[in-house]
Amino acid sequence: MRATKREHDSFKWAPGVGKSTTAAALAAGGAYVIPEVNRLFARPNPEPPHWYCERQVARWEMARLRSSQGQLAVLDGDPYQPLWFAWIYNDDGWPQSSAAFSFYRDRIVHGQMGFAALYVFVHVPEPLRHQRMLARELSRGLTTEIAQKKIDRYARMVEPQRRLFAALAERFPGWVLDIETVSLDSSLAAIRRAIAAVPTIDALEAFDFIEHWLTDNVALSP
């Protein structure tokens, strides 16, 4: 697939929904896939402040370079993940998001970050996602008990994430493509159609909306 320099796709959803499989299929069709931070960079110990966010900026620059060369760039993992991870897991030791908001805003203002032309929200029914993730974690050598704890932790992501990206889809029509992965071919066809009609998004306007929405909404019910 060829694309203009604005055309980045971004994936980042709960494990087991098929996002990496979809990204790999796009790569087979000519797209350039930028993996998630933990697959792309070795995490230092001790980890410097903002190291994780800085690596997201590096991933964004990789996508921008490929797009400027006329290639579709696919971010397998949302560069703004730290914002909504902190929102969802704010009671689980994840760093508070205020510093991350300041970090990203500064990068956007100085032209070092932007947003993907299209977000692809990939999902499957929760029982199927559970089944897939359990099989994957057991194949990696985890015990059933440890695998189940990991599955339960990521299950907390599903509903808050759905609400956030539904809000983005309502505020910015055409920016978020919602796909239930019934078949890979139908998912790819939907992505191609959406890429052909992506809206123009002002990065600061989108960032302001996300910041205010995350501030005004509770991730998990008490």
Image: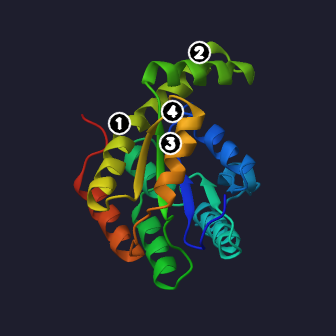
Kindly report which numbered mark, 4 or 3, lies closer to the viewer in this rendering.
Answer: 4
Q: Is residue 168 above or below residue 207?
A: above
| Kind of element beneath mark 1 | helix
Quarter-of-image position of residue 69? bottom right
Q: Residues within 10 Å of mark 4 (few under 14, many from 20)?
A: some
Task: Name the residue type under label 4.
Answer: Thr
Between marks 4 and 3, how big is the CA–CA gap?
Answer: 12 Å
Between marks 1 and 2, how big is the CA–CA gap?
Answer: 23 Å
Hey, which residue is sitting farthest top in the picture? 144
Answer with mark 4 or mark 2, whichever residue precedes in sequence. Answer: 2
Kindly report which numbered mark, 1 or 2, lies closer to the viewer in this rendering.
Answer: 1
Between marks 3 and 1, how big is the CA–CA gap?
Answer: 11 Å
Give the x, y percent position of residue 197.
44, 62
Give the x, y percent position of residue 43.
72, 54
Disc 2: which residue: 145
Disc 1: which residue: 159
Task: Name the residue type under label 1.
Answer: Glu
Disc 4: which residue: 181
Q: Residue at x 49, y 65 (%)?
A: 117
Kindly report which numbered mark, 3 or 2, lies closer to the viewer in this rendering.
Answer: 3
Task: Name the residue type under label 2.
Answer: Glu
Q: Is residue 176 above or below residue 67?
A: above
Quarter of the rendering occupied by the N terminus? bottom right
Give the x, y percent position of residue 88.
39, 45
Between marks 4 and 1, how big is the CA–CA gap?
Answer: 17 Å
| Kind of element beneath mark 3 | loop
Answer with mark 4 or mark 1, whichever residue precedes in sequence. Answer: 1
